[in-house]
Image (cartoon, helix red, strand yellow):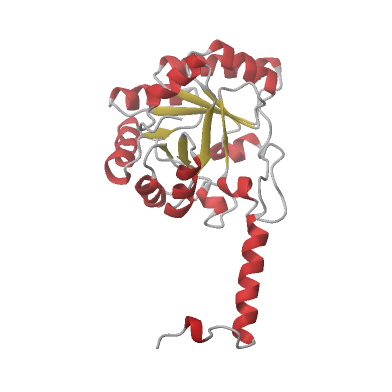
Amino acid sequence: MSERRMTAPEFIRMKERGERIVVLTAYDFPSAAIAELAGVDALLVGDSVGMVSLGYKTTLPVTMEMMLHHAGAVARAAKRALVIADMPFMSYQVDDDDAVRNAGRFLQEAGAAAVKLEGAGPTVEIVERIVAAGIPVMAHLGYTPQSVHQLGGPRAQGREEEAARKMLAGAKELQDAGAFALVLEVVPMDLAKEITAELRIPTIGIGAGPHCDGQVLVFHDVLGIYEGYTPRHAKRYAEVGELMRKAIAEYAGDVRESRFPTEEESIR
């Protein structure tokens, strides 16, 4: 693994070389630092921060100021990984000039190196404008969380022939608009395979099967931080949440039973 700083153009070269791309979400300095040491290629500061870190039911309440705050923390920890920041709901949908300005804030104020936008259609022209301003853009198709109410919930997209055709066309339009990569979320694996084969830019899958050029998962899902529901497409590589609970419970017990602090932990 190279120690050089990862860049958006390097993503495309990795696809050309047949190298798989590893992306993980991160929302703060310590999680980004751990992921960086583990050798991920990119850190996605997702607007999923609203759900996994801030307690919201959807990503919709997340604002630009929230995202700049979290993206800055992640960027300060990243030495090699490419830092990509989600543009939150209504930060790019209303006005093209605002979209470019908001995208630029992630680079100028937070230190991110790229931004991510959801959808095709009207978003294609916005991607083109942002890229023309010198800002790398990762695109996102399939289940797009900012459209949760329009889609009727977190459902797989592209199952029907017409929907699949439309998604493939949108993927090509986003590529032509200058996107350097495309996230495919909760998409049938055969459609993801077809889109991956048709594009020059890499696809990053999440619930889209094994044929994408790379994969992204949520930090908290990988580590098993929360008990209960885990998305079908996620794999828990550890049960860190249970380890944390046990450690804190042990600390609480030591305090209540006067086992902590001892003379060893006391100042003389």
Residue 182 drawn at (x, y percent): 50, 25
Q: Is 224 on the left-hand or right-hand side of 219?
A: right
Q: In the rendered image, which quarter is residue 9 located in?
A: top left
Rendered view: 241 above or below 81 = below
147 lies above or below 227: above
In this rendered view, identify the residue nearer to me: 209 or 48: 209
The x, y position of residue 84, in whole percent, is 42, 37
Front-lying residue, 46 or 263: 263
Residue 89: horizontal and vertical position, in percent?
46, 41
Left or right: 256 with respect to 173?
Answer: right
Inspect this view and state whether residue 196 appears.
yes
* Residue drawn at point x = 34 percent, y = 24 percent: 131
Using the rendered image of the protein, determine whether residue 62 is visible from the camera's viewpoint. no
Q: How many labels does the image show?
A: 0
Is 110 placed left or right of 193 in the picture?
A: left
Image-quadrant location for residue 107: top left
Residue 204, image x and y in percent? 55, 27
Residue at (59% x, 22% y) in the render? 212
The residue sitting at 48% across, 49% down in the picture is: 34
